[in-house]
Image (tube, rainbow, N blue to C red):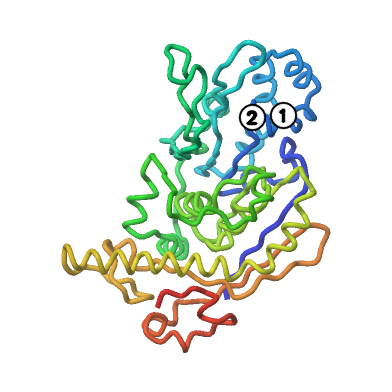
Amino acid sequence: MKKTTHKIYFADSRDLSFIESESVDLVVTSPPYPMIEMWDELFKSFNGDIRKALDERRGATAFNLMHLELNKVWDHLYRILKEGGIACINIGDATRKLGDEFRLYSNHSRVLVYCSELGFSTLPLILWRKQTNAPNKFMGSGMLPPGAYVTLEHEYILILRKKGYRRFYTGEEKLNRQESSFFWEERNTWFSDIWDLKGTRQNLNHTEARERSGAFPFEIAYRLINMFSVKDDLVLDPFFGTGTTMYAAMASERNSTGVEIDSGFKSYIEKKTPVIIDELNRYTGERLQRHLDFIEDYKNTKGELKHTNIYYEFPVITSQEKKLKLNYIERIEKIDGHLPEYRITYLDRATLKKSMVRDVEKLPFTASDDQLGLPF
């Protein structure tokens, strides 16, 4: 049976010397955003000059000093990524008034410039729309020109690649890549440069923990992991928080490592992880259900499809989807040791074929079909 492992280090990600060079396939993370007030105390703890600059209302100085701290993380990410590895960084710009000056602090551009200087190749980015209809969202002079300000209703997902292209040489590597493919209709949505996640599952984390960590939605981590890695890869999140990236990696059959400076999240992770199987399996089932819904609509409007997935025996648009396979999680085990570490075991779907779709009662689930949210 397929297995993955997931480790969590409670440490400062500005020093990732404990992670081996060129050992990570993908980074998916969201750092603390400079000049966003909820992160002020963290940045002040990194450098006393940041506290002084904020106290003296010197915004530009504080902004620069905060990014110097983040740059230490980006240095390590470039070192530990494999050649052709990808880093996906979710970050938002900040607007803030210090003293008499209101201004934009362009976090995304600072990260892009520095990472380009490190040697990363910048790939097309994604705008994550976070539209708000709050009645108090207008800033500045209200309805009067010229002192009203544009409202920021998006964040950035920066996509950076370490030099070179990833290669798949052996037959086993090529098969694993094929089984890691995504559906044609997912390709059209996921690789759009604007993401609006209305109507999607926003997060698997509790509201209180999410607000404390600034966690991004599960859907974002899940998409990025499936877009830019293959099964059995190692995914790193150096700003682990509530573990969104780890849970998305578990659902996607990838290994993961998380680094988190706040050990206060440990009890939350240890409580949440053993009972998250049903939620992750339900998400996998919903993904398959969305494909079946798409196929039904496609047949009604455009006719029969030319290709068939060999494992599920349902239609797919392209030949590249013929070996796509999604495995459900069977169990999560905590590994004894000084680190929080988990081993995930998956149910192999390769031998089920038609029975998976047409004979649900014959599937060897440890949880009930209703708990898993199966679409069939």
Answer above or below: position of 204 versus 155.
below
| Residue at 33% over, 69% down | 292
The quarter of the displayed image where residue 233 is located: bottom right
The answer to whether marks 1 and 2 mark residues whose Cβ atoms lie closer than 8 Å is yes
**Mark 2 neighbour class, 10 Å CA radius: few under 14, some 14 to 19, many 20 or more:** some
Residue 322 locus on image (x, y percent): 33, 67
Answer above or below: position of 100 versus 10.
above
| Image quarter (top left, top right, bottom left or bottom right) of the C terminus | bottom left
Q: Secondary structure at mark 1?
A: helix
Closest to the observer, 306 or 247: 247
Closest to the observer, 12 or 85: 12
Residue 139 locus on image (x, y percent): 51, 23
Residue 349 locus on image (x, y percent): 47, 77
| Residue at 24% over, 65% down | 297
For label 2, the residue is 36
Q: Please say whether residue 27 is visible from this viewpoint.
A: no
Closest to the observer, 82 or 220: 220
| Residue at 75% over, 61% down | 270
Seen as rendered, the residue at the extreme bottom is: 362
| Residue at 63% over, 68% down | 344
| Image quarter (top left, top right, bottom left or bottom right) of the N terminus | bottom right
Query: Amino acid under label 1?
Result: Asp
For label 1, the residue is 40
